[in-house]
Amino acid sequence: MKYARRPIAALLAALCAVSVAAGLTVTRAAAGPTSDPATAAGFGGTWLAHQINSSGFIPASAPATGANLSGTVDAALALAAANVGGAAFTRALNYMHGQIDAFVKSGADDVPGALAKLILLAKVAGEDATKFGGTAAANDLVARLNATKRTTGTDSGLFGVQDPAFDGAFRQSLAIIALKAVGSPPVDAVNWLSTQQCPDKGWQSYRADTTAACTATDVASFAGEDTNSTAIAEQAFRSLSLTPPKGDPLDFLKAAQNTDGGFGFLKGTGTDANSTGLVIQAVVAGGEDPTAGRWAIAGGTPLTALLGLQLGCDAAAADRGAFDYQTESPLKANLLATVQAVPGAARKPFPLATGAPAAAEPVACDTTPAPTTTTTTAATTTTTTVPASPVANAVVATPKFVG
């Protein structure tokens, strides 16, 4: 699967019906496996680890065949955020060493967002992103990303020759984050992203004319400023220790919060896991607590809304810990939702810290009976119950691959 040039939530929303009333609430059939965000991230990470096969990739969903390369890279980054699934992370990393062009090329051109994600993956693994899987020029991810930057025209400073209509701000932010993680992004690239900001401090996917008013939000045509572009831009500027010139994007995001505490792609659309996960990352990057302050409202917090989309003990064993895109009954395991929900639940903005994740794979809803030991003496017989670990491995059916 090629790297999706449109942000994940936008892709999903094009396929799923969006709710147009902010604050729409739906009663879930059962609670998620935990109310602790870090534990939830671990459960979600374990589910993702189980999707990565022995060859190191997540298989593409029918009717496609082969590897889901975008899902594999996103899953590896999510494992790093949750600090679980080290063996699966290593398999994915090693597999991607040999899949650079298959992942980052669209026709004859490199895709900047895909290159940025590989740079972030290399950074987490402690590898040199200029020698990712080899020493040839093709293995220099940093040079390849910088080579995509436009140097002339209205969009000078923008990474990628591809049409930016759906992902201009998103891919630019990813590129800036990645280049900052391994050095410094070009000044004109940062300036391009700055000029794209709207007066109310948010971003839309792309503004062809930054002297014109930003597009008004229109749920029907899926147009206007969105939480995803804004949240990733916030992370880009915070990685540079900067506040955008028109002000803190968290103010825009706060105005887009739904009454259940979560976020949709556009203001006025129902809460989804991708948007809520991204916003949580942005809130943490901005130095605020997503469980308190202005983010804690009567209906919940961004984290309670996100955890409400995690499959719990009522789901099939192979699906527990995964996240669904939006609330439905029953919830269904969704790869694209889970890869973005996990970093949000872990409260880890991009770029992630260097260091491969731990080997642990905590499994949700362990029902293994607590072991007992019996000690007999001449006078008494004592039975001791040993508390089961909350993350002990349960018997898990062979996972199905979704996405």
Image (cartoon, rainbow, N blue to C red):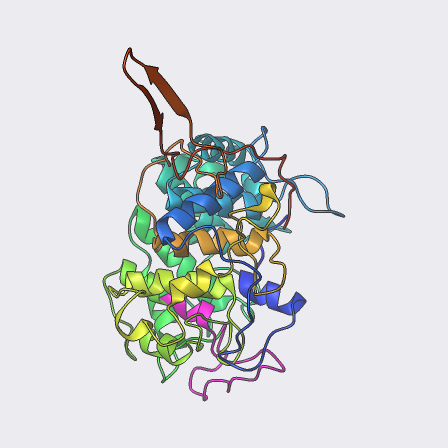
Residue 142 visible in the shown view: no
Q: Position of residue 45 (x, y in %)?
A: 46, 43
Which quadrant of the figure has residue 247?
bottom left
Residue positioned 52% across, 52% down in the render: 338
Determine if the magenta segment contains residue 154: no
Q: Position of residue 252 (x, y in %)?
A: 37, 78
Q: Nearer the viewer, residue 158 or 73?
A: 73
Residue positioned 46% across, 56% down in the render: 341
Residue positioned 29% across, 53% down in the render: 184
Q: Position of residue 31 (x, y in %)?
A: 50, 57
Which quadrant of the figure has residue 86?
top left
Image position of 156 with respect to 109: above or below: below
Residue 55 visible in the shown view: yes
Image position of 393 with respect to 79: above or below: above
Q: Position of residue 262 (x, y in %)?
A: 44, 70
Image position of 141 with respect to 356: above or below: below
Count of labels in the image = 0
Q: In the image, 402: left or right of 117? A: right
Residue positioned 39% across, 66% down in the render: 302
Query: Which is the main secondary structure of the residues drawn in magenta?
Result: loop
Q: Which residue is at the far front?
A: 379
Task: Report the magenta residues as a range.
Answer: 205-233
